[in-house]
Amino acid sequence: MKNFIYAMFVVFFAALAPSQVRAQETASFTVSLNQDVFFGFYPTVAGSYALSDQLDLSFYGIFWTTPSFGTGGGGGLWTEFGAGVSFDAGPLTITPQVGILNGKLLSNGEFGRFFDGVVPNLTVDLSQGRLEGQLYFGYYKSITPGQMMSPDTETLVPVSSTNDFIHYWANLGYGLSPVLSAGAHWEHLYFAPANIDAAAFTPDTEPVAADLYRWVGPYVQLSHPDGHSLRFVAGAVLGEADASFYKMTAAFSF
């Protein structure tokens, strides 16, 4: 798996060489500022280089800033970087990508590390007249267990389990005017422990898979003619009485 990921990024950067990218090809870049009740604040960047009328080379990065995703105090913060391709299929833009995770959240150890895990992901965007929508699916897969100090604090030992996640959402909306649109959003985050060392757990203490949240609600978005936008979405967390969810995203495209 590691060799495959390394090879993918070698191909990605080779494709960006001047000899490969023709002068007439265009590029785009988007910076998004995101904040929600679960993940906290996480800026993202996404870009693409047009290789043909129908195919783009794509890349993205996510700066996860939540302290619990690292060691706290700025140490070991989760950092995600990925690349892939993007192509048009009628009103749909389909973008399969593979990302690498760096930090400690997936490996579950005490120390941040390079190549914490891998995340194959797919984004499908819909744009047809005033109709807009997006489907996202990502599988956050841990690679190897992290390390922690042994009880005698003299040696490092592997952790007894790692953390995998499945994250997906879907939304669909309609443009009420050139600057205002509204719609509905559904989102689900699922936790699945992996690399479990059963001998390290007593009966009934072994980690088990669970829904971290499932929620649905409406969104409203204000857009600028230059491609910038501000979206706010809020809704109810399913299965939890009186629990709610909210998220705001400001996107700036260049």
Image: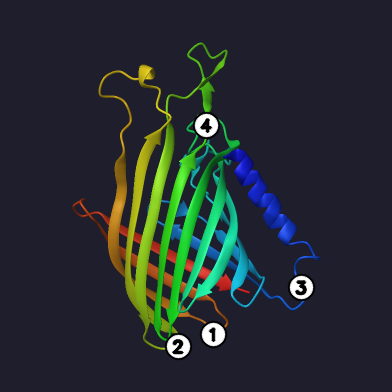
Which residue position is annotated with label 2?
178
Q: CA distance from mark 2 to mark 4?
A: 48 Å
Q: The residue tagged with tag 3: helix, strand or loop?
A: loop
Q: Nearer the viewer, mark 4 or mark 1?
A: 4
Q: CA distance from mark 3 to mark 2?
A: 34 Å
Q: Earlier in the sequence, mark 1 or mark 3?
A: 3
Q: Position of residue 49 (x, y in %)?
A: 66, 69
- Assess whether mark 3 and mark 1 are in contact (beta carbons under 8 angstroms): no
Q: Position of residue 52 (x, y in %)?
A: 65, 74
Q: CA distance from mark 4 to mark 3?
A: 40 Å
Amino acid on which disc 2 is placed: Pro
Which residue position is annotated with label 3?
22
Amino acid on which disc 3 is placed: Arg
Q: Is residue 227 above or below residue 143?
A: below
Choose top left, top right, bottom left or bottom right for residue 216: bottom left
Which residue position is annotated with label 1?
225
Residue placed at 29% from the left, 41% from the top?
210
Q: Earlier in the sequence, mark 4 or mark 1?
A: 4
Q: Earlier in the sequence, mark 3 or mark 2?
A: 3
